[in-house]
Image (tube, rainbow, N blue to C red):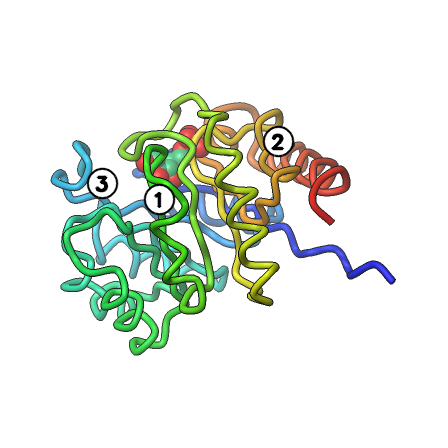
Amino acid sequence: MSSPPRKLWLAPSLLSADFAALGSAVRAAETGGADALHLDVMDGHFVPNISFGPAVVAAVRRVTKLPLDIHLMISRPLRYVETFRKAGGDTLVFHVESDDPPQEVARAIRASGAAVGAAIRPDTGFDVVRPLLSELDEILVMSVHPGFSGQTFIPEVLPKVRAAREALDASGSLALVSIDGGVTATTAVDAARAGATFFVCGNSVYNSTGVAENLSRLRAAVESGARHGIP
Ligand code: DX5
Ligand code: ZN
């Protein structure tokens, strides 16, 4: 008997939206069929760019019921777990390359009541995440170097997506495998084939034609990739 298809999540990244009209960007994602929203927090230290902090997360929280996936590209995630949880984050995704011990960050996130995500940069091996697997609800594989939207997808990370999927399946974990960076209707097919189930889409949602149209194109892409990928 084959298992039911896994849920495929489309998560528009607000980093690519018009910050002067964030409310409309959130509504467009919601009415266009997004499953979650991805919010990129950057401290100018872990990554060269600075984006936004808890006040913006809280503002978005007030206008949507969509799950908020908070991507913490910050050097000291431990200090901010409570803050981003209180601001309304449903999942807090920290980088294993940050300055804080990954086990401690994962436990602090769990204790806050949020779901736990761990992210890896393109040049970080999957083995760094392995010891954490049983503590995770999401593994986020970065397919660009973190810091900016609108970069080109790095296909060399796809074996890591596959490794994550296989390791999670082998351990019976239902954690999501996310892909973040340069996800388009073309690259999403490959990521879905490799076993990704959560697709962060910045430019491909907000920077061309209509949001709803972009989301349906991405939906078709991930569904077709998943049909031909890991069962
Ligand atoms: C990059 C961020 C991404 C970014 C994705 O550091 O983590 O979430 O917003 O944007 P696109 O989809 O345009 O690469
Ligand atoms: Zn991100």
Regarding residue 104, the answer to whether it shows in the image is yes
Local secondary structure at mark 1: strand
Q: Which residue is mark 2?
A: 190
Residue at the image position 34 percent from the left and 74 percent from the top: 110
Ranked by sequence position, the earlier of labels 2 and 3 is 3
Q: Quadrant of ligand 2?
A: top left
Cβ of mark 3 under 8 A from ligand 1: no
- Amino acid at circle 1: Ile
Closer to the camera in the image, 153 or 102:
102
The CA span between labels 2 and 3 is: 29 Å
- Amino acid at circle 3: Ser
87 w.r.t. 214: above or below? below
Q: What is the x, y in percent for residue 225?
A: 70, 36
> Callout 3: 10 Å neighbours few (<14), some, many (20+)?
some
Closer to the camera in the image, 52 or 132:
132
Regarding residue 15, the answer to whether it shows in the image is no
Q: Which residue is mark 3?
A: 51
Closer to the camera in the image, 179 or 30:
179
Residue 14 occupies quadrant: top left
Of the two numbered discs 2 and 3 in the rendering, the one whose residue sits closer to the viewer: 2
**Residue 194 placement, left or right of 48:** right
Local secondary structure at mark 3: loop
76 w.r.t. 183: above or below? below
- Amino acid at circle 2: Asp
Q: Which residue is mark 1?
A: 120
83 w.r.t. 227: above or below? below
The CA span between labels 1 and 2 is: 19 Å
